[in-house]
Amino acid sequence: MTPVLSFRNVWVEYGDHVVLEKVSLDVAPGAFVSIVGPSGAGKSTFLRLALGQEAPSRGEILLDGAPIPPEPGPDRGVVFQRYSVFPHMTVLQNVMFGARCDQAPLTGLLMGAARRQAKAEAMAILDQVGLSASLKAFPRALSGGMQQRLAIAQALITKPRILLLDEPFGALDPGVRLDMHELITGLWREHGLTILMVTHDIKEAFKLGTRVIAVDKRRHDPHAPHRYGSTAVYDFPLDDKLKTAIPKEIAVMTGEA
Amino acid sequence: MRRLLNARPRGGGRLLLGLLPIAILVLLYLVASQARHAENPRDKILPTPAAMAQSMEIMALQKDPRTGEIPLVADTKASLTRLGIAVGAAAATTLVLGLSIGLLPYARAGLGPLVATISVIPPIAVLPILFIVFGLGETAKIVLIFVGITPFMVRDLASHVAAIPEEQIVKAQTLGASTWLVALQVALPQAMPRLIDSVRFSLGPAWVFLISAEAIASDVGLGYRIFLVRRYLAMDIILPYVAWISLLAVIIDLLLLTWSRTAFRWAHAPGGRR
Ligand SMILES: Nc1ncnc2c1ncn2[C@@H]1O[C@H](COP(=O)(O)OP(=O)(O)OP(=O)(O)O)[C@@H](O)[C@H]1O
Ligand SMILES: [Mg+2]
């Protein structure tokens, strides 16, 4: 099976500041990959590469076996920690935006049957994320958790090949976070998604992921901290039974132990 | 006791508080006017309300036999037309330039420095140039207002658009939006309330430029009239005209605010400070 996403010996350098070095990995279809690592390790940079928001300084990135388009597109969905939804659109409009871009590239407005169909699809997804009671609300009237539900619903409408999540639940209360875990797991199963999720929460990473990747520097030069970049230092495939036990190396690295 | 910072006037009290300073000023004027008239019944500097009403009856209700028009109506029409065309053109230009500069790195690199340079030129200093180029007619006055307010508005809108979180722009692209759709559906709606605000702030300077241009070369207009009757020290006309101009300014401001509140509800916090 061709991997959905492959990194082949990818480097990211800003001048002589090496952020990522020698990153090579394949993401299989249907995988839920959690990425953990200390702050500043380059986790977001890694996602920006997958989004096409940034190009690697060396190496190549493949999407379904072909070189990745050099800018964001509907084949890769994204949810950030904040600011992922449009404040000037209602809940329903936010979710319909993907369909509007796809079918009305000139005006962004849908009419008649196309509109009805897009609306029905949007309502179905909104129902799944539990937002069907707030169709006409603007995002600022929603709680943080509801905004993230909306952002996820919005990303799913284009049926992306891979869903990229950058600390999607980082700003939420623990209780709300648990609800979101259930939601994302359900959606992942139901839609057969491939997910790449960056998180600071090590337990979350192991609870949700089918694979956990730890990003950190392999080598340190105390006199020139920028000289070496991060790479995937640990890569744990998990099967369901193992999910509760967090390997010691990772617990130590992220300060959870 | 509560901090002064947290004490808020409510409802009727708030209205009363706003009217109080105005009432005091009016009262002071009346007292001063009385005093001057007691000394010299023919005083022209601080005319009584009765004298002002009498003059305004001529200006606002009777046709000028020479032009066949009511002066106040003709002046108001002429001034508002100039102001409307200039501010409308400025707003349209601002939308196009502000969105481009705010969204497109190429437009920012190409046009940013130009707009920044133009915005430091004092507009009144180029008025002679405008009169030479466009003649003494309507065009020069409209262009003066346009030149006076547009650069500021463009810079304001461009920086507002540039401050739309990168996350939103990336998200739109992952939903399949082209540059055009990002501009039309993401940036434009978020720029509109700011543009309306910017027009509201620019109307002050716009009136200044309008009245300056009318004072220098015109034969009709609110500014023209004030400067015309100044020769006769006709404060009984100047003061009501100034009050009328202020009233117009307040009404325009309120209309714009109402438009922004109704058409862009999402941008206004319910019960917020604004
Ligand atoms: N445009 C840039 N120019 C220079 N350095 C950059 C740039 N973007 C990111 N960096 C650097 O790359 C490093 C990794 O940043 P990144 O945001 O990927 O970290 P992160 O792992 O997501 O951190 P956090 O957990 O705090 O979100 C940081 O040291 C940052 O300073
Ligand atoms: Mg990050």
Image (cartoon, coloured by chain):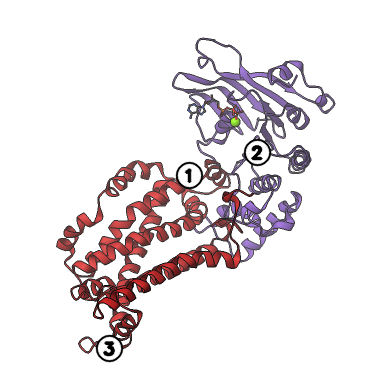
Helix, strand or loop at mark 2: strand
> What's the amino acid at mark 2?
Leu
Q: Quadrant of residue A68?
A: top right
Q: What hue represents chain A? A: purple
Q: CA distance from mark 3 to mark 2?
A: 73 Å
Can residue A183 be seen here? yes
Please tell me the numbered disc located at residue B63.
3
Instruction: Kindly indicate which chain is depicted in red in the rendered structure.
Output: B
Q: CA distance from mark 1 to mark 2?
A: 26 Å
Can residue B92 be seen here? no
Residue under the point 36% across and 61% down: B204
Residue A203, percent from left and from top: 76, 28
Pick whichever, A157 or B17, lies toward us: B17
Q: Chain of mark 3?
A: B
> What's the amino acid at mark 3?
Lys
Crowding at dot 3, Cα within 10 Å, few <14 / some 14-19 / many 20+, comes out as: some
Q: The C terminus of chain A appears in which quarter of the rendering?
A: top right
Depth-wise, is mark 1 or mark 2 nearer the camera? 1
Residue A240, percent from left and from top: 82, 28
> What's the amino acid at mark 1?
Ala
Residue B153, percent from left and from top: 37, 54
Pick whichever, A168 or A55, lies toward us: A168
> From what the image shows, is residue B136 above or below residue A152?
below
Crowding at dot 1, Cα within 10 Å, few <14 / some 14-19 / many 20+, comes out as: few
Please tell me the numbered disc located at residue B163.
1
Please tell me the numbered disc located at residue A163.
2
**Do the residues marked 3 and 2 share a common chain?**
no
Residue under the point 22% across and 68% down: B215
